Amino acid sequence: MKLSRRCFLSFVVGGAAGTALSPLPWKLTDDLSIWSQNWSWTPVPPDGEYTQVNSTCTLCPGGCGIGIRKAGKRAVKIEGLAGHPVNDGGVCLLGLSGLQLLYGPARVKTPLKRTGKRGGGQWQAISWKQAIKEVTEKLKELRKKNQPQSLASIGPNGSGTVSALISRFMKAYGSSNDMKMASKLDSDEQALFLTQGIQNGMVGADVENADFILSFGCAVLDGYGSPVRMFRANSRWKENSATLIQIEPRQSNTAAKADQWLPINPGGEADLALAMANIIIKENLYNSSFVSDNCDGLNSFVQMLYENYMPEDAARRIGIDVQTIIDLAHRFATAARPLAINGYGKGQNPSNLKETLAIHALNALVGNIGKKGGITGLSAYDYIRWPKVVTDTVAAAGLKESRLDGAGTNAFPHAKSLPNRFFDKLSAGNTSIQALLVAEANPCYSMPDTAKIKRVFDSIPFIVSFSSFMDETAMMADLILPNHTFLERYEDVPVKAGLTAPIVGLCRPAVEPQWDTLDLGDALIRIAQSIGGSVGAAFPWKNYKTCLKQTLADQWKDLEKKGYWMPSQSLQADADSKNKAGGKSGRYVLMDGTLETIYMAQDAPLEGDSRSYSMLLMPYDTIRITSLQIGAPPFVMKTVPDTVLKGQDGFIEINKKEATEMGFKQGQAVIVTTPIGEARVRVHLSSGLAPGVIAMPRGLGHTAYDDYLAGKGVNINQLIGPVEDPASGLDTALGIRAKLAKA
Amino acid sequence: MSGNVEHKSDDVNHDAKEASSADQTSMTTSGSGSYILLFFLLGLALSMVAGWVVFPKLLYTQKKQPLDFNHKLHLKEVDSDCASCHFFREDGTFSGVPALEQCLDCHYEKLGESVEETLFVEQYVDKGRQVPWLVYSRQPDCVFFSHSAHIYGANLECRTCHGDIGHSESLKPYEENRITGYSKNIWGSNIAGLKQATWDRMKMDDCAQCHETAGIHDSSVQTGRDACFVCHK
């Protein structure tokens, strides 16, 4: 037998026929298709009992109610809580992505001690016992040297127990250098005191019921105030045919969706508001019964307006024609429920006090103070009633030393904390700070002139960070005592973000702590108790949860059940009575000596001279990028368009025509230089920006966190420096002079 | 063979010669013809054996369950049949394979002296570890299946899909498909996919067949029809 080629072919054909008649190809096809749907890297949700934990989001000041869906022990989804007074079922992009913060790689998983150079990122994992011991030893040492005032803290600007515990610790320890990060709430608080005599209060704006909204640069659709609430308010305005006027140099999302966009020169808000006030009074369009019954100082206010804020002069400074201002004043004053809101962008940075007062004065002139669709001065939250701290002699002596930032002094009598001035002092060579505690704040990223801030950090001998994440500030610390994330801990969340009624949300653990972390409150209690003496005595609680339960006393059960608590008016009355002692409550001060000084003062000039720096660089806020102490999780970063961030490159917005004249093409790399620093960015040609103005988003250019965030774009705080508002002491930089050159 | 071609080409023109060459190649001598058939059959037979016998053997790997659970014994001890351990939660979701916590309701201490009980208590109860059961009926993650709809809505019995496992005294080996990682019970033990009982297979076609027979044509909430969205949300 000879095996020919034909035999072989025949064998193959037979084999093919046999295979086709067997289940092999069909079964294999089926299996391969299933195999291709089950790659090992495809995430598969865990199986288990489905449960839901109701809590409060603490990722921004908004205070939304959230429901965390769980499968077994794992949190699988965050949703907005239907029926919640703040967000009624809505949730924002960041809240929705909160699980990536919980399970993401940027977590600090155990207490860490720095081993290498500061900022070098070399750490040694240590136990909690050792971590507490190291902090205690250092702090005891400072007190032994009678230098308790050389300890400083930087914490969140909140009204809840976490912020209060930090302050209590500082007080018991003996230092008044207790810094809180500043925001729009600080300038609002000062304005509220100056106009209505309410101390430590907050401004509520009834945005939902207004029908003519004048937004002075507020990022209504990009995270202003309580973001979800603002989105809902915007929908309501559309349904009710209310009018939204956006006053802002840049065509933001809010400007694009507004009924009218008024592009003014940067920093022209106060001029515009006061010119409008001038017209409203001159044409007798103001609410005369309200003003005569409730307002003080109308005559001197009018005089000041006529001398300094004539519409023609203002129009020139603002860069819009006078008729537009007149029309706007008419429409505002004759609307049924007009409302002017203030705070640039998300309101994460303080506003100029003159601007804040001017905008509030507009509301007073049309009589919508404490009315439906108006603004209301709300008293401070007053439910934390711990026994007074009894200080020992060391602490008492330390507390006599004045604050480094000058808050509360004659220069800045109404300021509570001025972190910008604190860092300026240290940067200018003051070496009195020997130890620093940082909690729920990331100053090395979010404060202007980050290079300077980092130099200051470098000069402080001992820094403790309580960050849950490896952020820029934690990178500069000597010890990291990681806090639980908001999904693993209890916290009271008194909301201040412009709501019309006080509300305290309860943040509570949805899952077990994922790593070896400890609640910030517990860490503070343990440190205080291990220092002992009068410091320990000021912290008598077994743990933070006990402290929280005792603080909220009768409200605790309700809070646990409902998830939030709305302090009744009677409870707030106590706080009100304190204000009445000031003698101003119930009245609105349009003008007095203090206000006159503020209105008459020249605006602080922008940093840099206009000859070498021909342009003005402004930061802008977008809801797609977080810009405070929380770094944007990957889901959030995925929504950033590639005209803002492409690959690792950040973009700078520039007027299209101007860019063409300068010879820049879309996407071209340029070097932006300011008196503070320089950076390489690409240009995005935009029609929504005046010539001479360039804009960059806040929130990019992280150097810490994880690969999903670090190294993407440029941190605008590297390029801008603080500009101190002479009236409030707060940093109110609206931008900085800058120039562009081809890279 | 080339001789034949040349011989024929004497009578035809050049074009015709080329056209007919194909016919001529199929002509074979009788001796090599039978060999060719033999090889065809050989190929056919070998591949049939490979496909029907060898392939199924190679496709599955056998795994032992962590514990040899006795359903029959447990069924005698409990009050509400299958639902004693495989119950519906308050929200209507199905608990599926019991977690250790459910076992602990009875097995908080050792019950009896059997090898499996000792193993269970020592390895899982004492250590607080979940038993890593291998689930014969585990479906891919892209499938949404509501037990509630089938048990309460359609009044199906457990055995309609799961067979008589409730009366078994011992757990059969878990045969895992090497390619997909799923149990052999999904495709069924017959490699051709033939089935006799309703519980012999758990493929998509089996779901569809039952829906078709029962005349369910509106079970998708999204589409109001009986198509993809019923199970693939």
Image (tube, rainbow, N blue to C red):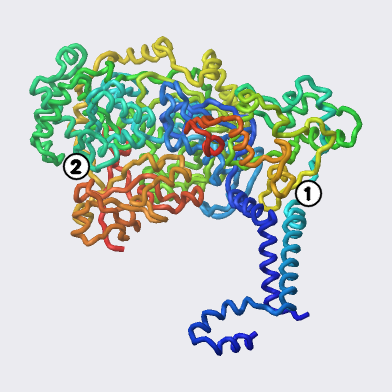
Q: Are marks 2 and 1 in contact (CB under 8 Å)?
A: no
Q: Amino acid at mark 1?
A: Gln
- The residue to which callout 1 is attached is B62
Q: Are marks 2 and 1 on the same chain?
A: no
Q: Is residue A629 above or below residue B111?
A: below
Q: Amino acid at mark 2?
A: Asn
Considering every residue shown, the one lying at the far front of the view is B11
Residue at the (44%, 21%) spot, across then down: A83
Q: What element does badge 2 sit on? A: loop
Residue nearer the viewer, A70 or A341 = A70
Residue A638, visible in the rendered structure: yes
Residue nearer the viewer, A612 or A689 = A689
- Residue A218: percent from the left, percent from the top? 29, 34
Which quarter of the figure has residue A140?
top right
Residue at the (29%, 53%) spot, across then down: A684
Quarter placement of the C terminus of chain A: bottom left
Residue at the (31%, 15%) spot, across then down: A582
- Residue A213: percent from the left, percent from the top? 24, 27
- The residue to which callout 2 is attached is A265
Residue nearer the viewer, A412 or A198 = A198
Q: Chain of mark 2?
A: A
Q: Crowding near pointer 2: few (<14 within 10 Å), some, many (20+)?
A: some
Residue nearer the viewer, B155 or B71 = B155
Which quarter of the figure has residue A483?
top right
Q: What element does badge 1 sit on? A: strand
B161 vs A690, left or right, is: right
Residue A396, visible in the rendered structure: no
A707 vs A209, left or right, is: right
Residue at the (51%, 41%) spot, across then down: A435
